[in-house]
Image (cartoon, rainbow, N blue to C red):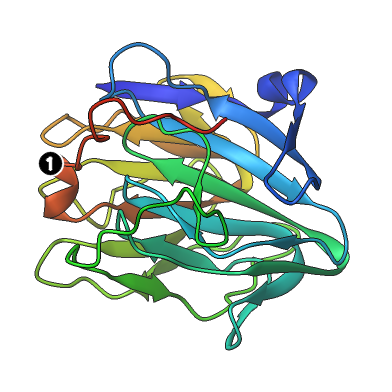
Amino acid sequence: MIVTGNYEQAKPHRKAVTILTGDVFRRTDIIAGGGPDERPHAYLVEQSPGVSLPTHFHMTDQFQVVVSGSGMMGRSHKLAPLTVHFARGKTGYGPIVAGGEGLAYLTLRPRVEYGAHYFSDPGTQVDRKAPKFQATSEIVPLQSGVVAATPARALIAPDDSGLSAWLSSLTDSQAFTSPSAGPAGRFHVVAGGAALVNGERLPPWSCLWVSAGQVEPHIEACLGGAEILTLQFPGYSLFPPPLPAGASVPT
């Protein structure tokens, strides 16, 4: 399965979402999911200055990529473009606190899951036996102006499960070769410049999902170059834990 999401086309459908604390976030669905559970999901979250997203978890593995602004995740991880964070399903993380400029970040999942399970919510049941894992990259500034070609660099180094994150910089019309193809699917994100995917122009923060075993589409940089972020899910993402029978799904 190959699914593309054009950020510029998605922007007009930006919506307000109220979370458990009563704060209002903005969400833009870039790859909206829908259909069967295996459909991927990619969306942009915008937090206002000083607003905090409480510590929580999801049932599904996910990547998050900081697009703009600044903030903190927990007590030790500073957030700025281009921080990449991975959390395994049922792994708690946060709080995510937006800085004085606000904070915007992509959330990318191999299957659709709306809402969150907050530790502060008395109704949240935590599986204490579930394996926990998360990884956060160092902050890597994007190139400004015309992008120069540089070798792909690992933002999250590959491990035995296949998990990894890479940033590739392409010059004018340069073809892209994915630096990682693991046992599960992966997202490519246009992090800078613009790219052509099978002839379709994708502007910054557009997303492309490629399922495991799928032949990569032809991707090349537009004039001015492009920066492509590749987010490879680990092998255990092939078998995401289902929601418990009868469980309510937060919106």
Residue at the far bottom: name it. 76
Above or below — where is 59 with respect to 5? below
Please name the residue shown 19% across and 62% down the image: 130
Left or right side of 3 for 37: left
- The answer to which of 53 and 179 lies nearer the viewer is 53
Left of 92 or right of it: where is 243? left
Q: Is residue 108 visible?
A: yes
- Describe the element under mark 1 as helix, strand or loop: loop
Q: Residue at x 9, y 70 (%)?
A: 160
The residue to which callout 1 is attached is: 239
Number of on-image labels:
1
Spot the residue most to the top: 35
Residue 192, percent from left and from top: 63, 51
Q: Quadrant of residue 234?
A: bottom left
Q: Is residue 224 above or below residue 42?
A: below
Neighbourhood count class around disc 1 (C-alpha, 10 Å): few under 14, some 14–19, many 20 upward: few
Camera-nearest residue between 173 and 125: 125
In the shown orientation, is residue 10 left or right of residue 145?
left
Picture quadrant where residue 103 is located: bottom right
Look at label 1 and name its amino acid.
Phe
Image quarter (top left, top right, bottom left or bottom right) of the N terminus: top left
